[in-house]
Amino acid sequence: MTTTTQTDVLIIGAGPVGLFAVFELGLFDMKCHLVDILDRPGGQCAELYPEKPIYDIPALPSVTAQGLVDRLMEQIAPFKPTFSFNRMVSSLEKLEDGGFRATTDENEVIEAKVVVIAAGGGSFQPKRPPIPGIEAFEGTSVFYSVRRMEEFRGHDLVIVGGGDSALDWTLNLQPVAKSVTLVHRRPEFRAAPDSVNKMYALQEMRELEFQVGQVTGLAGSGGQLTSATVKGPDGDVEVACTRMLPFFGLTMKLGPIADWGLNLHENLIPVDTEKFETSVPGIFAIGDINWYPGKLKLILSGFHEAALMAQAAKRIVSPGERIVFQYTTSSTSLQKKLGVA
Amino acid sequence: MTKLSFVAFDGTRFDVDAENGSTVMENAIRNAVPGIEAECGGACACATCHVYVDEEWTGVVGEPEAMEEDMLDFAYEVQPNSRLSCQIKVRDELDGLVVRVPERQG
């Protein structure tokens, strides 16, 4: 079923800059909907280094990346933004009325008057393990996620990795697959100790195999995998298999944004420095994903860009309306919006 | 100043003067050593500053901590002398250190 969300502004990316854009747009009464590939707000701050301190946020001498995200969520709460998590905007088209229609990878439709791309380094996507020739098996024998467990029924399955995804799927698919071999570089795991214990218990009962090593080669033809070479402490081992699930973490890729007809500059989106608008009027780009002379990839630069973008977005969302510049310190109308007056 | 040498995958050698307290990765980036990407900027969150520590130096440099070990799972062709260069701090004892850059990062 297709659901259509109507909003003033669609923000692609719920990292710190996308979140702060909700605040700046909200002061001008624009409603925002955010789409992010991750399952929670925060972008790189939440995914890559939540516990790391950041020292260059003005007036916060030290704040952890997750702490910054939590504060931003609190700051934008009065504007009641809506979110689509675990989603990627796969296509974006301009409508005749001047607005935009975005479709996610799960076929949800979002219609907005303005689009703000705040996608940082791109969308987080599963990292392709460095195995020569793996591309030839992707989508037929090698998968980076499990959509339906049934697709693995009766298969000799190799799962690669040492994190929670690898261990969880090892345990979940073990009863379904014909055989499961878990391959990990070392006998220690990042995954939850409980899952690791369960895995070792199953290995003890010979219900699955655990192989220490790194997958260095794949064999098969026509996309059909027949075996994987595992380089272990005692040399190479051939593991017969028909399906492989590598879980090597996430990396950032520009993804479908490249297909939206925007001018690009080395995988970044050039913008002007007055409105931070892209080559397509009505589509803005702020934060790490944009480029202009002198650009610095700093969170504080992204915040500044959000503030200026909001002025320009307001002119599109409410044409003809006079924009009054106000301070939150003294404006009762802004304070009402923030719920403090 | 502490002397460090990076050997790129094609064999090109980069001899650099490094300040104590800086990371080996920072010195690679500062001197544009090819093959060190450092995507995450040194947060031990990406495994794209992977290097091989010269065998003669592994004892002095030391072993990776647990978090770095976890991250090394994502690196390409991990060997016993693999380290993430953002997690090696330059100090006097490392004067003359040689690290090799792998064929590729992840």
Image: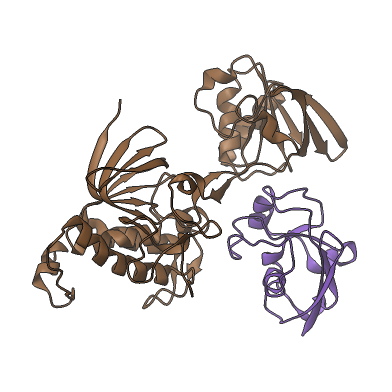
Chain colours: A brown, B purple
Say if residue A227 shows up in the picture: no
Quarter of the figure with residue A299: bottom left
User: Which residue corresponds to the image point at 67% horizontal and 29% vertical from the top-left?
Assistant: A137
Residue A164 percent location from the top left of the image: 56, 40
- Count of marks placed on residues: 0
x and y percent of residue A129 in the render? Answer: 68, 42
Q: What quarter of the picture does the N terminus of chain A occupy?
A: top left
A245 shown above or below A316: above
Q: State the image coordinates of residue B13 (x, y, percent, origin top left).
A: 85, 70
Query: Is A278 on the left-hand or right-hand side of A225?
Result: left
In the rendered image, the residue lying farthest to the top is A154
Instruction: Answer with left or right where residue A151 lies relative to residue A278.
Output: right
Q: Is residue A328 left or right of residue A296?
A: left
Q: Is residue A165 left or right of residue A336?
A: right
Residue found at x 44% / y 73%: A62
Q: What residue is shown at x 40% (from left), y 57% (from top)?
A: A118
Residue drawn 28% across the image and 58% down it? A22
The C terminus of chain A: image quadrant: bottom left
Q: Position of residue B28 (x, y in %)?
A: 72, 70
Depicted A1 relative to depicted B14: above or below: above
Q: Quadrant of residue A302?
A: bottom left
Whether B33 is drawn above or below A120: the answer is below
Q: Residue furthest right?
A: B56
Residue B10 visible in rendering: yes
Task: Give whichever of A140, A234 is nearer the camera.
Answer: A140
- Residue furthest out toward the bottom: B1
Quarter of the image holding residue A339? bottom left
